[in-house]
Amino acid sequence: MSKSITLSGVLPAAGFQRLLDAVRDAGFRTIGPRARNGAIVLDELSDVAELPVGWNDEQVAGSYRAAKGSGDRLFDYVVGPTSWKRFLYPPRRELWHAQKEGQAWVPEAPADDFEPTAFLGVRNCDIAAIRTLDRVLLDSGYREPVYDSRRSKIFIIAVSCAAPVSTCFCTSMGGGPTPTDGFDLSLVELGSGNDHRFIISSGSERGAEIVSALNLDEVVERDLDAAATQDRTSVEKINQVPAMANARSTIAATMRSDHWDEVADRCLSCANCTLVCPTCFCVDIEDTTDLSGTSVSRHQQWDSCFTMSHSYLHGGSIRKTTAARYRQWLSHKLGTWHDQFGSSGCVGCGRCVTWCPAAIDIRVELEALEESLKEMTTEEA
Amino acid sequence: MPLPMLPVPMRIRRRVKETADTFTIELEPPDGTFAFEPGQFNMLYVFGVGEVPISISGDVSRRDVLVHTIRDVGTVTHALGRLKKGDWVGVRGPYGRGWPMKIAKGRDVILAAGGIGLAPLRPAIREVLDNRDDYGRVVVFYGARTPGDLLYPKEVVKWRARLDAKVSVTVDRADRTWHGNVGVITQLVSAARTDASRTVAMVCGPEIMMHYMRIHLAKLGIADEAIYVSMERNMKCAIGRCGHCQYGGDFICKDGPVFTFAEVESRFRIRSL
């Protein structure tokens, strides 16, 4: 995707369906936000009415509430429990299968039938998450074939965040409410009612091509002012986590801290944080055989460092305690990820905070580690 | 599209029982050639059971046969132990960074193995003994629990008979047939008599054994940068993306399994890492 961003024009909200149709006509199915079972999840849609029109969400540590309000805006909520990882690196997928003939067998890999897909309503934190997964699965020595192929088939329609929640902290991870690159198209939703409209920017040639047929209105100063105000208001609402700046060194220095045991008293080791995380990439691999034992199918599925089996080594698990497993998750995400892939593994989306049933907040734990480091340093001095 | 998770089926051409719980299988690479470096490993797959990382124990100069010595410690290794000559095993590899054979050239070399740790170290020992003139003083230390647990006993006897290498074997618990050393492997170290400033040590065994070996090697004056250890963690993919073998910032499958002690020193004794 090209890094040059072009301001394409303004689309009245009443014409949003035209955008969806243009994307479909360009050969993409669309996956975007849908309200389901009281949450905003990601799934296929083709009609603007299928979007969570008027929905809002409230998120704090350990709590998520989404509900339809009286408004007509399309994107006034943030990220839900699903992330785009679900589609690019699915929770379960067959690696290969084989049939025994005599004693011999030959493995065969299934073809991947992922269609060209537009991701609609991608938030800036999730663009950062996709970029983070790119570094893990494409740019660190070898290219993961299925992720690679799917990645080349997606069309990203980003949207600026106008309603951040208390669990958001993208601005502490180098992000912000408004996407600046990594998309084909980017939307800023402005106003409501008769004044409801979208500023559309294109970040790629194919993005520009798709919007060129939409007969967009010209962007005027009033639109740009409103977008700037909305962005500023969002930035002010997003929590700042100063401790993130030193996360890597704080963690490296606190691997033996008592604080890990303290977290373990609250942590249920349930793995929710790792499963909602848009960048966690651990996968387990398992075999399924038929009853005769002649046909086998080998799958990979998402795994979590919170399971005992994750660190199993002949005779037992290396990380037997919740303290050791929580330490692995946090120290990897915020610390050793830098050693491995040259960036933090965290994008500040806040999913792990919201979906933790024990309301454990990665930001608060990092701050506590920073405190424990200060105490350790004082004791030494 | 390259498919790194797809194994190559290979036929077992020979199976040898080594000890009560350890066996060796020799596999036939389909095109008759399999190149690897000492210290590297393969992922071995048993049909319908699963896949495990197993170090390669054969000779680097023998490309027509792939040798793996395996201890029966879990479901997959148990299933591997039940396979017979003519059966098929899926192979992916070789993977990982092996022993520092190039760095060791021209230097004194200490090779120390504890238990099954001899299996990953054997290609390095053979490489050194087969090209003896390329190295300075050569010392091999090998410790096992009991005389019955010694791997490759006939071969070890041949190594011991050599006049151009010091080869010491010890067991934790002797029986009445045993005439050699009794006690932990570290007690052999002081007799190494290598030139510490030009010695490369390669150590493979349980973490606790490597920890104490390093202390004793350091007493001889050998730097952490010249002490190499082979680490072990759970592995599912061997290509750095399943996440299981993480050891701090390293993936043991691709950044290791062999590391200098200097590289792992800061995390070596962190519990449950």
Image (cartoon, helix red, strand yellow):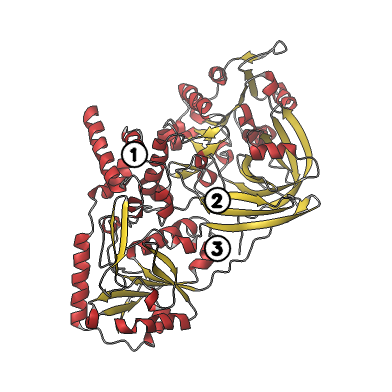
Tag 1: amino acid: Arg
Label 3 and label 1: CA atoms lie apart by: 37 Å
Residue holding disc 2: B239
Few, some or many residues within 10 Å of mark 2 (<14, 14–19, 20+)? many
Kindly state the secondary structure of the residue where label 1 is placed.
Answer: helix
Residue holding disc 3: A146
Q: Are marks 2 and 1 in contact (CB under 8 Å)?
A: no
State the residue at coordinates (41%, 62%). Answer: A130
State the residue at coordinates (70%, 56%). Answer: A98
Tag 2: amino acid: Ile
Viewer-proximal residue, B115 or A55?
Answer: A55
Tag 3: amino acid: Val
Viewer-proximal residue, B50 or B152?
Answer: B50
Using the rendered image of the protein, determine whether residue A10 is visible from the camera's viewpoint.
no
Q: Tell me the quarter of the picture where residue A375 sits.
A: top left
Q: Where is residue A180 shown, x and y percent of the image?
A: 31, 69
Check the image and report above or below for B249 versus A3: above
Kindly state the secondary structure of the residue where label 2 is placed.
Answer: loop
Location of the C terminus of chain A (image quadrant)? top left
Judged by depth in the image, the label closer to the viewer, 3 or 1, is: 1
Answer left or right for A334 relative to A109: left
Kindly state the secondary structure of the residue where label 3 is placed.
Answer: helix
Q: Where is residue B12 shown, x and y percent of the image?
A: 77, 43
Q: Tell me the quarter of the picture where residue B127 sits.
A: top right
Check the image and report above or below for A43 versus B11: below
Q: Which mark is residue A266?
A: 1
Viewer-proximal residue, B31 or B87?
Answer: B87
